[in-house]
Every structure is written in C-alpha cells, then in structure tokens.
Amino acid sequence: MSAAGFEHWLDSVHRWRWPLLLAILALRIGFLAFNGLDLIGDESYYWDWSRRPDWCYYSKPPMVAWLIGASTWSFGDTAWAVRLPAVLLGTGFLYYLHATAWAFYGTRAAALTLLLVLATPNNVLANFLMTIDPPLYCFWIAAVYYLRRAVFDGHQRAWLWAGCATALALLSKQAALLQPLALAVFLSASAARRRHFRGDFWRYLAPVVLAAVPILVWNDQHDWVMFGHSKSHFGNEGEFDAWRRLRDVRDFWFYQLLLLNPLMFVLTLATALRGLSGFRQWDDERRFLWLMGPAWLLLILALSFGQKVQGNWPMPFYFTGLILVAGAAPAPGRWLKAGLAVGLAMVLLTYALPAVLQALNLQNSKLDPTKRFKQWRVLAERIDTYRTESGSDRPVFVTVGHRFLASQLAFYLPDHPRVYRYEASGGVTSQYEVWPGPTEHLGRPAFLVADIQAARFDKRWSDSLEGLTLLGEVADPAKPSTKYYVYRAEKLKAWPASLTLHQEGHASP
C-alpha cells in the first residue's frame, strides 16, 4: 500500500470509528454465541465466585465476580453470559484507547493506535475470555484518558473521573496500584506539574482509597489471604534450577511475542528503551505515557530473568507504549506496516480457527489447540451419569484435586450444584478453602470425584467418610491417560477443622 493510500485508510478508520466499533462488537458477540468452546478453568472459577458476592476473594478483588454475576443473573448460567462482559468491556477499552491517542497526538495517531491494538492476538483473547484482564484493561486506559484531560487540558472534574476509573481498575486487579504511583512520579519529575500535589492529586486518590477500604477490611477478617497469595508470586521457592529458569524465561518471552505479535513487540520494546535512556529530554506528554505503561513493562521483562512471571502481567503496560509508537510515526515505515499485516493475519486466523479445524476434520486431534476448551462439558456429562445412578438423595458433592475440577463440574453439571473441595495439605490454596465447609451437611451421603484413588487419601479424609464405594473411572477427554475416580460415601462424618479458613463464621488462627 502506498503512503497516500495508507494515510487515506487511517483517515477512514477515524471518521468511521463508531460503525467500526459497533461492527467489531457484533462480530465478537456472534463469535461468543457460535464458537462452541467451553469455559476455561479460570472462567468457571470466577463464575463460582459470582454465586457468592463478596468484597474480595482468595486471590483477586471482586470486580470479575460482580460482572459475571450481573451478566448471568440477566441472561442465565451459560458460557455466553459469562463471557459477555469481556466483549462489552473490550469495546469500552477500544473507545478510550482511541480517545486517549487522539488527545495526545491527533486523529491520525488515534486511528493507527486502534489498528495496532486490533492487530494483537491478546485483544482477541481479552474480548473472549472473561478473566480479570478485560476490566483491568478497560478501566486502566480510561484512567489514563481522564488523567490526560486533568493534567494537560486543565479539566478539574477529570481528576475525580480518573480516580473513579483507577478505583474500578483496583477492584479488578491489584496491579492498578501502580497507576497512582506512576502519576506521583510524573508530577514529582515535572516542576510545572508539582502544584497538583496541593489538591488535585488527592482528589484523584480519594476514590482509589475508598475502593481499597472494603478490600482491606475483608482481608483483615480473612487472615490477609489475598496479600499472602500475591506475595507468593514473587521470589523463588526451593533450590535454584538453571534449566527450569531458562525454560520459564523462554516461555514468558515467547508468550509476549505471540500475544502482542512479534513485530509490534519489538517496536514497543524499542520505544520503552528509548524512554529509559531519553526520559530527561522528553516532553511531559511522552514522559506521562511512558510512566503509565512502558516503564512498568521494562520492570516486568527484567523481573522475568530472576523469577517465574505470568505471561499476562505486562499486558496493560503495552497500551500507552503503542500510543507512543503511533505518535512517533509521522510516516509509517515498512516494519510498522508489516507488523499490522502480521498481526491482522494472526487475529483473523484466531477467529476462523474453529471453522478451519472443522473443515479439515482436525477437531479434537493432536493438532487442535482448542481441545482445552472442550473437555469439561464432556467430563461433566459422564460424571453426571454416575451421580444419577448412585441413588443418593441430594448428596454432598466433593472434589479432590485442582480447583478447576470443582468449578468446572459446578458449572457444567445441569443443576449447577454447590461443590466443595478437599485440600489434602490442610492449607488455604483456593477460594474453596476460604468458604465454610459442608459442616451443616454432615451425616448425609457424599458424592466424590477425585484425581487420585482412595488408597492415596490421607487418613483424616478417609476417616471422614463412611462406606466408601468406587462407582467407576472417567478418563479426561483432553488427556485420556489421566483418570478421575468417582466414589459414593454412605455418610460424610466430618469435615477437617483445619481445612477451611472459616469455621462458624470466624477466621482460623
């Protein structure tokens, strides 16, 4: 495409941004409705949270559960309803991203930024999988937009709107605390902006503090379990294993290349590094954008060499980096155009993948990357057959295994039962141990699904079950070599007291 043709394309994207956003929204809702892919473990886990509304949960603040709860209350407990908030938030994210780039660099950069984000596979996932990321992305970039209006355009009300957006981001994920820290660093580094510390900054901070209060109160009542979980993500446990460390680094960096698309990752990283070396020479607008994303990106990338880092951690820090890339490209070169082309091809392939697999008869084969989205419904159907044949009247449903086993069975069994989880360590490793155990159901029959045989049950769990009978084995549809064992107990005699954080409504010591 010629330079003139590319510029005309960007102009059209800006002028027709609303029809474009609505078309993308319709496409994504249609994809949700017809792709036939089951929830992944995190989605069903957060859905189970949503059935018990609270101010916080074991590992995350409450926003993801609140949003899923509102959607499923309105549209029913279906995969489509669970994922609908991701599409709506993703559309809001695209609006605010375009508006932010427009406010900093004009209409051309706004259109280019919008295209750059649409050409990232991560944007597909963030508008399909309902995890903590969609609300974080939307509220993070909304806060950046309102801070731009407040700091650079002098809109006083925007300070409060920015604070509300950051507060919503904090209710989505703890990483949002980096935003007010970045703003404080920016204001401190600019002599012309330090005056905002006299009142404006605190007006922005007030909603953030207000949002933090219920999270802190909840954690104080629950032995600070969320903070303990967050702390566990940092540092390395056990002996240092060089090969494992190298493997983790390889996987993390490959994840970045795959989710952002290789060329855009390189361009964004180069922009982040330029900010590190040229921060003093940059104007305030570029400093602000760098501190609201690329600075933290570099920190996470560096951290990946010292410890295991989750691949999605840096994602919100790419957004203002892409704005900087677009704003610094008065005439997009071949590398930027190639990055757009590669990214859009990856995005189109992602959307077309279910249809391509079906056309080539590759569904559920070794070459089917969507297999992990299909195993749980089939597993639940097979287990429900045993449950129906067991003859128990409303047995207590307990799983022994990963938290996803409990949450996926709770979602995909037709009656969406309350599922309890036995944690062999006796510690708190998921939300299931934060919730009270089935102490009010003691003496009733129990239906168990375990990833180990009864001979490997620890003594306190074996002693809690009377009349244990193996009903059968069910192979994992995604891994036939892995089996789940289905049991019926005539009576659940006890629930180990140290298993749950709550006993009779009080936190355990």
Image (spheres, rainbow, N blue to C red):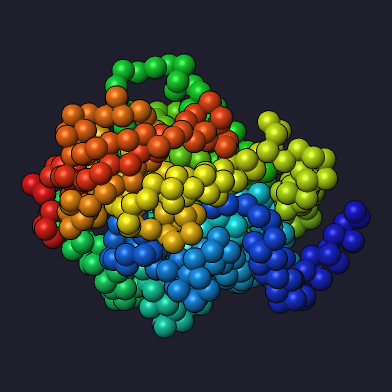
Q: How many marks?
A: 0
Residue at 37% of width from left, 50% of height from top?
391
As rendered, which of 481 and 48 lies closer to the eye? 481
Q: Position of residue 191 (x, y in %)?
A: 38, 63
Residue at 38% of width from left, 64% of height from top?
50
Q: Position of residue 3 (x, y in %)?
A: 87, 57
From what the image shows, is residue 253 above or below residue 338?
Answer: above
Residue at 31% of width from left, 73% of height from top?
207
* Residue 410 lies in quadrant: bottom left
508 relative to 396 in the view: left or right: left
As rendered, which of 59 and 372 lies closer to the eye? 372
From what the image shows, is residue 17 above or below residue 260?
Answer: below
Q: Position of residue 297 (x, y in %)?
A: 49, 45
As rendered, which of 410 and 84 lies closer to the eye? 410
Residue sticking out furthest to the left: 509
From what the image shows, is residue 478 above or below residue 314?
Answer: above
For the question of whether residue 476 can be seen, the reply is: yes
